[in-house]
Image (cartoon, rainbow, N blue to C red):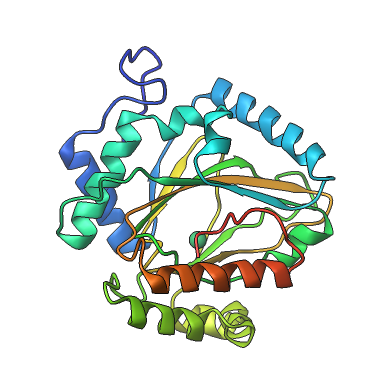
């Protein structure tokens, strides 16, 4: 995968990828569970995004928080990612590859997750399928000091197909996302048996995976650490349906049980 040019005038993030480069990214996701676009986020944008996270974290008392929806991102440096023509083309290309259908006209749903403090500790090993076909994960702050835990991404790659039937989708989600099921997915036995991948994330890279097909969660971080990721979810086959609203309410209840009363950040 080529390194983006800072001189590109059409996009503040990176130049558009060619069709065969997007196909190679899709093939990597099919094969390994994750496709990586290396050195895609310029250092100055990363620094501005980290300052934004630091500021927001102070507003949230130094504890876990999540932001979702369109408003927050327009006020944050990460708007550069949301408005990137290159990222939009990649998400659409991947969606087309995964479904064989024309891509969704709706833009990607952006969210921000910040794991910090004792509440952040509870937001680990919450295995789930996303409601969206394609997930782009942009690591902003990953603990890397000695004796810290990085909160690696744990992914069971491509366990199921894209679910077009909303009822099948929600039944499967209820089954595999329960607290009991999460304890099983967390075990070494299940991770070996079902071929889990542990992905070490490096800020600057962008990680793509089939969020609807791959069961995933993050490992824990220490309460004193800060782990921050931006997520861009694309292509929800069940958008606007009654079952989708039901699923969203179930997700909100799950967050409330964890003591997180603010906005949702994990694409349920
Ligand atoms: Fe997710």
- Please indicate, yes or no, whether residue 125 appears anywhere in the rendered image: no
- Please indicate, yes or no, whether residue 69 appears anywhere in the rendered image: yes
At x 46% / y 27%, what residue is drawn?
A: 80
Q: Position of residue 123 (x, y in %)?
A: 69, 64
Kindly indicate the quadrant of the structure image that contains residue 90.
top left
Q: Position of residue 205 (x, y in %)?
A: 47, 39
171 over 58 or under it: above or below: below
At x 64% / y 64%, what residue is drawn?
A: 219
Kindly indicate the quadrant of the structure image that contains residue 33.
bottom left
Q: Is 86 situated left or right of 187 in this image?
A: left
At x 70% / y 28%, what residue is drawn?
A: 51
Q: Nearer the viewer, residue 55 or 204?
A: 55
Kindly indicate the quadrant of the structure image that contains residue 7.
top left
> In the rendered image, which quarter contains the N terminus?
top left
Q: Position of residue 216 (x, y in %)?
A: 50, 67
Q: Position of residue 161 (x, y in %)?
A: 28, 73
Q: Nearer the viewer, residue 37 or 10?
A: 10
Q: Is 5 situated left or right of 116 in this image?
A: left
Which residue is situated farthest in the front direction here? 242
Q: Nearer the viewer, residue 4 or 87?
A: 87
Q: Nearer the viewer, residue 182 or 191?
A: 182
């Amino acid at each position: 995968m080529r390194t983006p040019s800072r001189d590109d005038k059409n996009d503040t993030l990176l130049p558009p990828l060619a069709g065969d480069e997007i196909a190679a990214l899709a093939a990597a996701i099919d094969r390994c569970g994750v496709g990586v676009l290396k050195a895609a986020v310029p250092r100055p944008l990363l620094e501005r995004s980290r300052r934004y996270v630091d500021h927001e974290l102070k507003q949230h008392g130094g504890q876990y928080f999540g932001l979702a929806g369109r408003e927050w991102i327009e006020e944050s440096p990460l708007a550069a990612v949301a408005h990137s023509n290159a990222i939009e083309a990649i998400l659409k290309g991947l969606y087309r590859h995964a479904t064989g259908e024309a891509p969704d006209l709706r833009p990607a749903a952006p969210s921000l997750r910040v794991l910090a403090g004792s509440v952040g500790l509870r937001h680990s090993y919450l295995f789930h399928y996303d409601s969206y076909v394609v997930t782009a994960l942009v690591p902003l702050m990953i603990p890397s000091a000695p004796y810290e835990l990085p909160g690696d991404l744990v992914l069971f790659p491509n366990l199921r197909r894209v679910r077009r039937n909303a009822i099948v989708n929600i039944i499967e989600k209820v089954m595999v996302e329960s607290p009991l099921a999460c304890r099983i997915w967390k075990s070494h036995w299940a991770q070996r048996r079902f071929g889990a991948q542990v992905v070490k994330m490096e800020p600057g890279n962008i990680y793509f995976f089939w969020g609807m097909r791959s069961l995933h969660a993050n490992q824990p971080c220490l309460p004193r650490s800060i782990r921050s990721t931006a997520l861009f979810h694309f292509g929800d086959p069940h958008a606007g349906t009654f079952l989708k609203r039901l699923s969203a309410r179930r997700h909100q209840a799950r967050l409330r049980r964890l003591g997180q009363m603010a906005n949702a950040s994990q694409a349920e």
